[in-house]
Amino acid sequence: MEPNFATLYESLRPTLEQLEAKRLELKSKGTKTGLIAGGICLLIGCAITIWSNTSPIGLAISLIIGLLVFAGCIHSQSSELCAYYKRNIIATLVTHLCPNARYQPEQGISEQIFIKSGLFSTPPDRYHSEDLISGQIDKTVFLCSEIVAEEKRVTHDNKGHTHTHWVDIFHGFFFVADFQKDFQGQTLVFRNTWIKLRPGRQRVKLENSEFEKSFDVYSTDQVEARYLLTPRMMEQLLTLDRKFPGKITVSFYNSNVIIAIPDSRNHFETNIWKSQLHNTDIQQEFQTLVTLLSIVNDLNLNLRIWTKE
Amino acid sequence: MISSILFIVIILYAIIAYNNLTRKRNNVDNAFGSIDAMLKKRFDLIPNLVATIQQYADHEKATFTQITALRTKSYDQLGESEKAEFDRTFNAARRSFFMVAENYPQLRASENFMHLQRALNETEEQLSASRRTYNAAVTDYNNAVMTFPSSIVANIFSFTKKEVLTIPEEERSAPNVKKLFQS
């Protein structure tokens, strides 16, 4: 895996030029639709204002609505551009970094895996996962995807009105990889908190004080937790934690390692307003992919010297 | 009245502290049992180890003769000193195993060697985990025995401090296991 962005960017230039042409074409199409729809809104607004003989504020409101409709029509073309961007740019970045990987923008990691990871106590009321990258790096099979899991909260005000709002349980990446050792139970590496209590699981106190400062470990089996979290693995997880701006949590489950990486940004997206020829987001996405795909090597998951091959 | 309440509180605390100490001591015994189980697993690897390496290890004959002699008994029949002796001999045999393998490419290429190498690494990793678990349980227990006020209950009921195991240097530091698979 050679993370040389400059060379890759040069090879992507023809595709980026096509993408830019596509953007201008879609923008023009959106502009035409926007002019018609926005114009109609403006005319209707003006007619109502004149007919009802109201103040000039009505005209201003009509103008604002017309402009919003105009901008909305152009922006609505973003989804088509985004699909093109994912199919041609992000997919190329992924295969450049990992030839055995496949990028499926509409697919994601199942809700069942999210729940079974055990990292979140609340089951999501609304769940969405996209941008699935699946493949194999040497001997390690992996999956990686963006996930937004939300909880529905309903509140009632004094007048008896019901308000519903959605709260993030998790927003970011899930990285699932085949672990190099077989194990039966579940070991969870949470962030360090004041309250050290997880029903049904035992707290595992480990020797690495730096690791203990950052994380709290709970497991169904004390010995198995230490079998997985060797001194080297603890160091590797600390190093990995420093690589991501969000604070990672880790689950060892079903002979897999599941890493939850919080990230509030919606990755691998573009929009109609931005020129695609000088899109600095591409380099950022490239760096994100490099960091994600190097997890396998960071955790040394290809080292298969134990009974699991 | 106040003295009765104080007395009840003290008795209740003593019961809680006693139960807590007992639970921690049981955890230590349980953790020690898992070390023993791992040592037994390791003991069961001897025939395979000897069969794989013996013909290549003329100059290490003494080590392998010693370990073969131990194998005439079952692990449960071994006394404490024999178990300690087995631990030392096995470590020597394991070191010889990897040293000999470095000099014989045909041995390294054999399926039996590969399988045994994996089994050895697995057992050593699990044994290391069991020792670390034991030490964590002992530290937890010792903290309860030595800190006030549970130390008073520990003294009354003869809960004594336990010794932690000395973890071999190669288990404490992150070993360069990759090296074993190269050359």
Image (spheres, grey):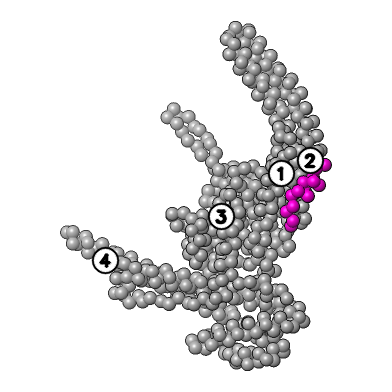
Three-letter amino acid code of the residue under disc 3: Thr
Residue type pointed to by label 2: Leu
The residue depicted at 76 percent of the width and 48 percent of the height is A6
> A97 or B110: nearer the eye?
A97
Q: Dot 1: within a 10 Å radius of its alpha carbon, few (fewer than 14), some, or many (20 or more) residues? A: some
A54 sits left or right of A3 in the view: left
Q: Amino acid at mark 1?
A: Ile
Q: Nearer the viewer, residue A156 or B46?
A: B46
Q: Percent x, y for residue A256?
A: 63, 60
Q: Specify the segment rendered in magenta.
A: A1-14
**Residue under numbered circle 4:** B11
- Residue A282 is marked as 1
Q: Chain of mark 3?
A: A
Q: What is the quadrant of the N terminus of chain A in the image? A: bottom right
**Crowding at mark 4 (Cα within 10 Å: few <14, some 14-19, many 20+):** few
Place of residue B56 in the rendered image (x, y in percent of width and height, measured from the top left): 72, 88
The question of residue A209 being in magenta is answered with no
Q: Earlier in the sequence, mark 2 or mark 3?
A: 2
Taking B73 as reference, is A166 above or below it? Answer: above
Q: CA distance from mark 3 to mark 1?
A: 27 Å
Front position among marks 2 and 4: 2
